Amino acid sequence: MDKGYKNHFDVVIIGAGISGISAAYHIQTECPDRTFAILEGRENIGGTWDLFKYPGIRSDSDMYTLGFSFRPWTDPKAIADGPSIMKYLKEAVKDYQLEKHLHFGTKVVSANWSSDQAHWQIETLSGGEQQTYTANFVFGCTGYYNYDRGYTPDFKGMDSFKGEIIHPQQWPETLDYSNKKMVVIGSGATAVTLIPSLTEKASHVTMLQRSPTYMVSAPAKDKMANFFNKYLPSKVAYSLIRWKKITMGRFTYWLCKRYPEFMAKMMIGGVKKELGEDYDIKKHFTPKYNPWDQRVCLAPDSDFFEAIKSEKATVVTDHIDTFTEKGILLQSGEELEADIIVTATGLQLIHFGNIELSVDGKSVDKGKLITYKGMMFSGLPNLALAFGYTNASWTLKCDLTSKFVARLLNHMAKHGYAACYPEQNNPNLELIPFVDFNSSYILRYVDDLPKQGNELPWKLKQNYFADRKMIGKGKLDDGFLVFQKSSKKATAVKEEVVG
């Protein structure tokens, strides 16, 4: 620790969600001589799993891969509810003694890299008061969306509606929706999770979608996993199950990309089997895009389809004309009456927690940054970001990133390096979007996000097996990472990315 600064740490981790806990574990375990702090703007760990309080909140990936690589998931349910996930995270923090590193209510506002001192100066707000931290390395585990509010389109006539309008991200825990008519706008993972739970109390729930989404059902409990857990040591069982899930997930994704028409037919056929031949599958469950161009929604134990078959839930595919006093008027002329309207219309994407980044006082334009291995940025010293997969469990990539950062820190310490940054010098590198997905919540903000290249190591393949080799075992001295011992020269941010 640098004794010359109050609140100075070797590493500052921003965020205490699932990726922040992973980062803390790996740094504590693999870099035991490093000091670190976890700065969390909220008053609890958990990130997404502490923030969202809507009924039925659960994982949309299996917990054998969404869980940590270093801590077995032993709950019988592979698709877990929010409280079970929070219990798992809290136990991890306690068992690995991470509490002493947590700084709650500490919202990071800005971070400035000082070339002269070779460290980051981090400005925070805590209880309305400004505090300053300094760190040799910053590890952003901030997620990918705005925690303060979700995305709700400015629908015509919203002010005229006499009932309640709620976004799932701001769900009131005291909301009484018993015997109420509800309309859920959207057909993504949140809507598909919400609707089966809402039907337990609401008089009726209507899912209103502009266009269909691919949906598949799967058992919430994995029989093979529970068999392994019963008869094998926990770590052995977890490893076998985890690799099985990773392999099957990757194979399914490959099939969707290689044989999209066949996989679309399979998925749509599965819905037809659930709902029967008389249901209008073509209108309500036949997307116009290929599987995994957007995320596929999961219905554990067919709960979403059971809600429809019970006639407690209805799917309507149409466009909104205007909100009315009683509900929503559709372009077809039909009016959906509602007491409560839920806008499950997506998230507001932000990069690096909306933290203002600068180098020697000059602001960094995040939209002009180029990502290295999906975690560092060309020209930005001593900074990494945990960003998970879009086509698999988020934590798989975050765990790889945490291990890489720990390995990088040890390499720098061994050789006495003050700074490290990726350098992109290929003038012919083609820049493409950071996230290769055509979901609306991504397309709305794609210009504000960093870019990736069309070749390694500037391109992330979204392939765990390839990334495990490139990130987990790839050389650090790869010709793209620049290491510097001199603190006064420890920066290389290009003029085009600073204001």
Image: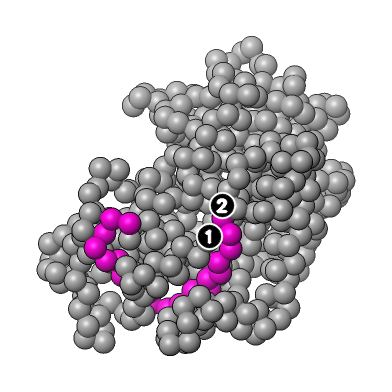
Neighbours of disc 2 within 10 Å: few (<14), some (14-19), many (20+):
many
Query: What residue sits 38% from the left and 45% below the top?
Result: 53
The amino acid beneath tag 2 is: Ile
Q: Is residue 216 toward the left or the right of residue 420 in the image?
A: left
Tags 2 and 1 touching, CB below 8 Å = yes
C-alpha gap between disc 2 and disc 1: 7 Å
Does 402 sit above or below residue 217?
above
Query: What residue sits 61% from the left and 71% below the top?
Result: 292
Q: Is residue 386 toward the left or the right of residue 311 in the image?
A: right
**Looking at the picture, how far across and down is residue 387, in whole percent?**
61, 50
Q: Identify the residue position indicated by label 1 in the image.
A: 300
**Looking at the picture, how far across and down is residue 421, in whole percent?**
73, 43
Q: Identify the residue position indicated by label 2 in the image.
A: 79
Q: Is residue 494 magenta?
A: no
**Looking at the picture, how far across and down is residue 125, in whole percent?**
40, 29
What range is drawn magenta here? 200-220
Q: Quadrant of the N terminus?
A: top right
Q: Does residue 193 appear anywhere in the picture?
A: yes
User: The residue tagged with tag 2: helix, strand or loop?
Assistant: loop
The amino acid beneath tag 1 is: Pro
Q: Is residue 218 magenta?
A: yes
Q: Is residue 152 toward the left or the right of residue 470 in the image?
A: left
